[in-house]
Image: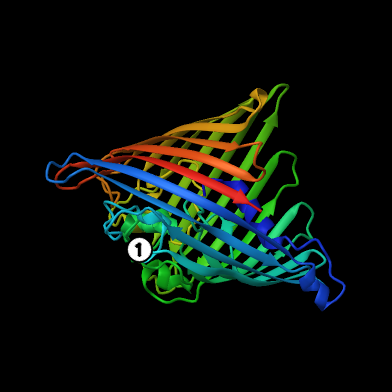
């Protein structure tokens, strides 16, 4: 959820978008449907370093090709159907593939095998200003999202209503029953780091490629899923406000609020944003008596082709059980202003995080190219539940659209951590340098 408020507009945009073509009968509903998709190639290499003399440094790599193929019918009397098939297939992998010091786990399924999944299969109905969408689908909301950072995204079984009758306001209500973890979740191996970084507290390596109960995935306890309600308002020029409530039955209730305002100047603009997350244990409290708060602010300026911003966040100090004072996000979604490309320590108890980023658009020089540099520092509480020292991350992101091949995106990313984890008893540190090369071809 690094996208902040934008991610939420993408969310209800994807949910509420009805096929604009209208069919005259059931036959033309299918014959006038459309196919779309993406072919993705992803290569990743991470060189891990440790200060522990008893442990060897290592470099792990992975390559995969895959993507998705989607078909959507035209709308007949407001009714349309959609389905999408997702696949990831490894190549050039070292042996044995199950050695995670050799093969990076974030592009593939259990045991670093290739896999495929029917990721979307939904029915959609639109009547005037109300849209219903139910079934398997891709979502991008603040605290439940696709987190499409590797080969395959997180996917959901959900039933949603979206209404725009109120001027400049979008209202969303729904219920999410199942979750299919994408490949990125395999970066973790359960525990508090996974639970605060968007994934399962009990198992991330094996819960891939299948839809499972929301509670079973998150904490190993079957629950009645997650009920969601949201309101997004954009009636004041340059101001966007949203509030979401996630009622994760018998686990926790999470409230997310976000507001952003952009001030236009003669040759530039400045923008300000704030976000708040508040979580409390509910019902049977399978995770315990969760009571945590995260707050963040961001300020930036856009001038010429530059976009520069700084952000600060703080999470409730632990004062005992670190997990119960952390922000728990087991179903993807990552809205934090202060997250790194990999490091997501800002949701751990007591963390004070500071981030700066600079993006430049090279359009005046001809190429359709943007480059981003960032640095984020995490001042860690002594009892945060994961690391016993501060951490930091810096990195870059280069996105290029070659004019010679329409719809092709070429992307190069890198992240470099410092003291990502400091061992509790020995003080030995773990850090890495990581590079990613990605090709995305959309059709």
The vertical placement of 424 against 376, above or below, is below
Image quadrant in which you'd find residue 351:
top left
Q: Which residue is mark 1?
A: 205
Number of marks present in the image shown: 1
Question: Which of 227 and 16 lies nearest the eye of the viewer?
Answer: 16
Residue 43 in the image: state x and y as whole percent: 43, 47
Position of 108 with respect to 408 (left or right) is left
Q: Nearer the viewer, residue 128 or 367?
A: 367
Q: Quadrant of residue 388?
A: top left
Please report the residue visible at 45 percent of the width from the left and 66 percent of the height from the top: 115
Left or right of residue 66: residue 112 = left
**Is residue 302 left or right of 265 when viewed as pictured?**
left
Q: Residue at x 27, y 48 (%)?
A: 383
Find the residue positioned furthest to the right.
24
Q: Secondary structure at mark 1?
A: loop
Q: Is residue 16 visible?
A: yes
430 vs 94: above or below: above
Q: Nearer the viewer, residue 309 or 292?
A: 309
Q: Residue at x 80, y 67 (%)?
A: 32
* Quadrant assignment, res 259: top right
Q: Is residue 233 above or below residue 123?
A: above
Q: In x, y percent, where is residue 168?
A: 76, 51
| Residue at 79% over, 71% down | 31
Task: Give the left or right position of residue 130, taking residue 363 as reference.
Answer: right
Q: Can you see residue 340?
A: no
Q: How is the image coloured?
A: rainbow
Residue 104 location in percent, x, y? 34, 52
Label 1: how many Cα within 10 Å (few below 14, some 14–19, many 20+): many
On the image, the x and y values in percent for residue 167 come to: 79, 54
């Amino acid at each position: 959820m690094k996208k902040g408020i934008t991610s939420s507009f993408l969310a209800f945009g994807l949910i509420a978008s009805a096929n604009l073509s209208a069919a005259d009968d059931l036959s033309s509903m299918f014959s006038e449907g459309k196919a779309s998709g993406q072919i993705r190639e992803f290569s990743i290499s991470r060189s891990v370093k440790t200060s522990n003399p008893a442990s060897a440094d290592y470099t792990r790599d992975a390559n995969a090709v895959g993507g998705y193929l989607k078909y959507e019918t035209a709308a007949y009397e407001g009714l349309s159907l959609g389905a999408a098939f997702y696949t990831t297939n490894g190549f050039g992998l070292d042996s044995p593939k199950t050695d995670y010091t050799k093969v990076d786990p974030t592009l593939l399924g259990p045991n670093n095998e290739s896999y495929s999944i029917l990721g979307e299969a939904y029915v959609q109905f639109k009547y005037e200003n109300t849209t219903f969408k139910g079934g398997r689908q891709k979502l991008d909301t603040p605290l439940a999202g696709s987190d499409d950072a590797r080969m395959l995204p997180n996917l959901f079984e959900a039933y949603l209503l979206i209404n725009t009758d109120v001027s400049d306001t979008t209202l969303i209500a729904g219920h999410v029953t199942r979750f299919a973890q994408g490949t990125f979740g395999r970066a973790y191996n359960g525990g508090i780091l996974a639970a605060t970084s968007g994934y399962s507290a009990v198992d991330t390596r094996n819960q891939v490629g299948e839809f499972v109960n929301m509670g079973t995935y998150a904490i190993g306890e079957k629950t009645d899923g997650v009920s969601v309600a949201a309101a997004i308002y954009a009636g004041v020029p340059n101001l966007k406000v949203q509030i979401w409530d996630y009622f994760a039955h018998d686990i926790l209730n999470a409230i997310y609020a976000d507001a952003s305002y952009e001030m236009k100047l003669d040759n530039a603009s400045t923008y300000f944003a704030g976000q708040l997350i508040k979580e409390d244990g509910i019902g049977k409290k399978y995770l315990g008596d969760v009571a945590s708060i995260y707050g963040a602010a961001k300020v930036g300026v856009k001038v010429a082709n530059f976009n520069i911003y700084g952000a600060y966040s703080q999470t409730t100090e632990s004062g005992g059980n670190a997990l119960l004072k952390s922000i728990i996000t087991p179903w993807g979604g990552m809205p934090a202003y202060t997250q790194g490309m990999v490091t997501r320590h800002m949701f751990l108890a007591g963390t004070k995080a500071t981030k700066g980023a600079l993006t430049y658009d090279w359009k005046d020089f001809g190429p359709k190219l943007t480059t981003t540099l960032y640095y984020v520092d995490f001042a860690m509480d002594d009892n945060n539940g994961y690391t016993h020292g501060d951490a930091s991350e810096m990195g870059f992101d280069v996105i290029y659209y070659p004019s010679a091949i329409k719809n092709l995106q070429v992307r190069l990313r890198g992240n470099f951590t410092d003291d990502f984890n400091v061992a509790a008893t020995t003080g030995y540190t773990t850090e890495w340098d990581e590079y990613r090369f990605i090709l995305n071809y959309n059709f």
